[in-house]
Image (cartoon, rainbow, N blue to C red):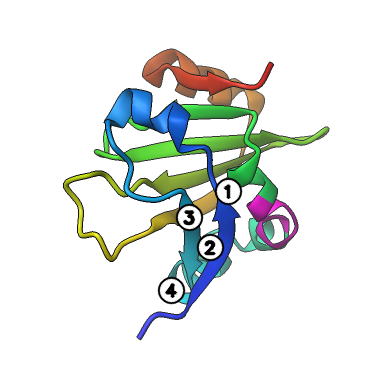
Amino acid sequence: MAEIRSLGRINIDILSEEFGKIQTDEIIVTNERLHHIKVRHPEDYELFERFGVKSVTSPDFIIKDIKHEGTVFMIKRLPDTNLNVVVRVVLETDDSKLKNSVMTFYRIRERNLRKLIEKNGTLYKKA
């Protein structure tokens, strides 16, 4: 069975404007997803351990993932890079036992962030 680690609470007001009712404001990451980040993005895993919580609870940008329903990119800017947390949001039509969850995490260059915003549009930008 998957072990679950709570990362805190996210602001669902921003997400509700785009997706409708969001079932919970809790966000989690499973040990399976942590393993995925370690294996697929090993150079970024330490950054997730250090900045993962802040990336989802206080992102600088939230961008809708137009390719996957109910999924957003939560971007946290650091002085030398940007962190991208891909989050699956629990919509009203989803199983009520689910929580908002981290799918993956990796660094994203400024140029790629601009392309992502241009292609998908911004749901939220920190003032």
- Tags 4 and 1 touching, CB below 8 Å: no
Element class at badge 2 = helix
- Which mark, by number, is residue 26? 3
In the picture of the structure, the residue carrying the numbered disc 1 is 106
The mark lying in front, picked from 2 and 4, is 4
Residue that appears at 35% across and 86% down: 1
- Which mark, by number, is residue 37? 2
The mark lying in front, picked from 3 and 4, is 3
Element class at badge 1 = strand
- The x, y position of residue 44, in whole percent, is 66, 56
- Tags 2 and 3 touching, CB below 8 Å: no
- Which mark, by number, is residue 48? none
Residue 18 belongs to magenta span: no
Q: Residues within 10 Å of mark 2 (few under 14, many from 20)?
A: many
Magenta stretch: give its range: 47-53
Q: Residues within 10 Å of mark 4 (few under 14, many from 20)?
A: some
> How far apart in space, not on screen, are marks 3 and 4 (Cα)?
18 Å
The mark lying in front, picked from 4 and 1, is 4
- Tags 1 and 2 touching, CB below 8 Å: yes
Task: Work out whether 67 lies above or below 44.
Answer: above
> How far apart in space, not on screen, are marks 2 and 4 (Cα)?
9 Å
> How far apart in space, not on screen, are marks 1 and 2 (Cα)?
8 Å
